[in-house]
Image (spheres, helix red, strand yellow):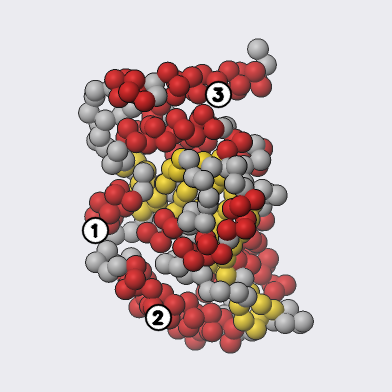
Amino acid sequence: MDRTAVVKVGAAASASVCVVFGGVALAQYIVAKKKRAGKKTKIIEMMPQFEKSTVHIRDPERVEQIICGLIKGGASKLQIITDFDMTISKFAINDIIDDCKMVTDECRQKLMQLKNKYYPIEIDPHLTMEEKYPFMVEWYFKSHSLLVEQRLEKDKLPEVVRESDVALREGYEQFFDRLHQHNVPVFIFSAGLGDVLEEVIRQAGVYHSNIKVVSNFMDFDDNGVLRGFKGELIHVYNKHDGALRSTDYFKQLRDYSNIILLGDSMGDLTMADGVPNVENILKIGFLNDKVEDRLDKYMDSYDIVLVKDETLEVPNAILQKVL
């Protein structure tokens, strides 16, 4: 049997498992053995990546059912909606510019002072998103204004990215290449600098035709010098508004009713708000900081929480079953 046939047989087998063990039968089939994160179910047990200590799941049975739904739908129904900073990447995109030689030491110091002031507010588990919102607007506005003062040059961005310590999560090539191979739409929704983000994935060799980026894009004058930013400001806690502004994009994908959403903040949970006719949505959250304070809340909000996990092993394992 050739490789293509084997893949097809494997996909059919996975789908069959979901059909056989759907509904009431699924509950009867759950393996009654205790694990660190709770009871594990059959499809999850087929993926050793779920045994990692970084994986936390509040409701394994729910995750099982969602993954079954994704498998049944296959590539023809799947779309990916993902954050970028600290989700696909191991870093914040803005750090590339903040640390580059195009920025003066004085500006770099001011940017760091802003981060030291506002980042603790962003991740404070005791503040609501509504309470954080004005602080995020203030932070982004001040940071963008500082960058405009630096008169950054567009044609130097590729060099800045090449010279940076940019790092994407391990497994990113497999992630993007598999999605491209199966024509799965990928919507990258970032509160970072869109021009830099695009250059990062371009140089990484994964800026494929199935990817759409919505982010804060720079506005350059005729000489290629930064003079401002285009469109509405996107920050970590107004992605709901941005998602609704992207409804035309999502309407074009109305048949793609199954979603895998990846993010690293509570604000990222709203990225799919503009999607009509959602059948199944699997929310995977990366928890990178203040784990003890925020883990319970993340587990209540995300179906799967990956704690200080610098890889895309779990999303890739799921995609291998679905596609």
Query: Where residue 73 appears, x then y in whole percent?
Result: 54, 32
> Which quadrant holds the C terminus?
top right
In the depicted structure, whether residue 90 falls above or below residue 191:
above
| Residue occupying image coordinates x 39% and y 59% | 265
Label 1 sits on residue: 293
Q: Disc 2 marks which amino acid?
A: Gln
Q: Residues within 10 Å of mark 2 (few under 14, many from 20)?
A: few
Q: Disc 1 marks which amino acid?
A: Asp
Judge by depth and name the residue closer to the eye, 98 or 140.
140
Residue found at the very far right of the displayed protein:
222
Query: Where residue 307 appears, x then y in whole percent?
Result: 34, 49
What is the secondary structure assignment of the residue under circle 3?
helix
Q: How many marks?
A: 3
Mark 2 and mark 1: Cα distance apart in space: 24 Å
Q: Is residue 28 left or right of residue 237?
A: left
What is the secondary structure assignment of the residue under circle 2?
helix
Q: What label sits on residue 113 in the rendered view?
A: 2
Judge by depth and name the residue closer to the eye, 94 or 26.
26
Q: What label sits on residue 11 in the rendered view?
A: 3
Query: Where residue 116 appears, x then y in whole percent?
Result: 36, 76
Query: Which mark's residue is nearer the viewer, 1 or 3?
Result: 3
